[in-house]
Image: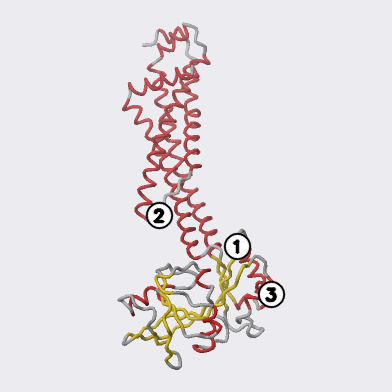
Amino acid sequence: MIFQNVKIALTSMVHNKLRTLLSLLGIIIGVAAVVAILNLGRSATDSITSSMNIGGIDLVTIYPQGNNRDGNVFDLQFGDTLMSNVSGIKTVLPIYTSNTRIRSGQDVKTVSVQGVTSTYFDVMNTELLYGDYFTALDNINHRQVVILGSDIAKELFPAGNAVGSYLSIFRNQSKRYLIVGVLEEKEATLGANFNSSIFIPINTFEQRFMNMSKVSSYICKVNDGVNTIDVSKKVENYLNDLVGSDYFFVYSAASIVEMADQVTGTFTSFLAAIAAISLLVGGIGIMNIMLVSVAERTREIGIRKALGASPKVIRGQFLVEAITLTIIGGILGIGFGIFISYAIVNVVGWNLSFSYGAIILSLGFSMFVGIFFGWYPAAKASRLDPIEALSYE
């Protein structure tokens, strides 16, 4: 019986193409808007998360501020102290940072020089364009070796022959450093602009370049499977007790991602709720076309009742027609919404992330609209008096 009613509904739609299309526009537009908004919201969130992952979603960075009340707590050994007191940390990398002038031939530039350990590059997921990283032995022996960011290498060595050459780094006096590697281009993250920085062993920085009173920053890598935000909060609590809140700043990419998820999620839900209003408008259109259909087929209803069709059967026929209309509108709307999503993400440069929940929700809501707005016309048809219906002109 249901398949027969669906067939009747499709036949009616084919015979009244323009009227059917106009009645479905509200459903199509509403569903397309909901699907597109939720897909774009998901894509935006995934894009933010992906960008943060490049810089390390599993990293927590500590920036010492001012002169703390207990003297120089933030020294090279502080990482070991932190790991002993805060669980969930795999390793802590101290970093010295300063601006300085460098010279190659006649070219002089001001750059950021960073003193790092040999494990820094692995933790920060950097790749070499050519050459090698400096080693732990280079660090122990305070060797004057340097790794260049991609932009520095391009400007000073456009021919690409940087490795093996020497670079003069100025502080109180000029010292020559052997270039051992050049990094591939990488997005700036966690306060480090890799492309326009140079990197030397941390012991070399402290002993031969600049003796700083405290470490510039610490990068904490979190253990696999451990929540980065939880570790970040533990670090903050520990440092609050150790030196006070005025003497450090803690940054975590994971906390930014969480905040972005909340903001985009709330905004997306708000827009989707507004878009869903058009589904209600579309439902009114479905009710209108069903009322017209009942009026046009009054004699047909009378004949069916005269032949023994019960009110339940008549009601089911028109209700199935209404649901069929909204399901078709929902499917067309989903296809249109996916097309809109694909077009927009191509323009803004995101990767499209499908919200399958949005598709299921939109289709389910379309069916609900069909039932809700189709019930009254169906009930009206089922209550028609067969004698009056047969005499209807």
**In this orientation, which residue lies closer to the viewer: 354 or 329?**
354
Tell me if residue 102 comes above or below residue 119 in the rendering.
below
Of mark 3 and mark 1, the one earlier in the sequence is 1
Of mark 1 and mark 2, the one earlier in the sequence is 1
Q: Are marks 3 and 2 in contact (CB under 8 Å)?
A: no
Residue at 60% x, 62% y: name it: 229
Which x, y percent locates residue 191?
48, 73
CA gap between label 1 and label 2 equals 26 Å
- Assess disc 2: are there few (<14), some (14-19) or many (≥20) residues with their C-alpha within 10 Å of its C-alpha: some
Q: To which residue does mark 3 refer?
A: 241
Q: To which residue does mark 1 refer?
A: 229
Which x, y percent locates residue 130?
40, 72
Residue at 40% x, 37% y: name it: 333
Q: Tell me the element at label 1.
A: helix
**In this orientation, which residue lies closer to the viewer: 122 or 9?**
122
In the picture provided, is 248 more to the left or to the right than 53?
right
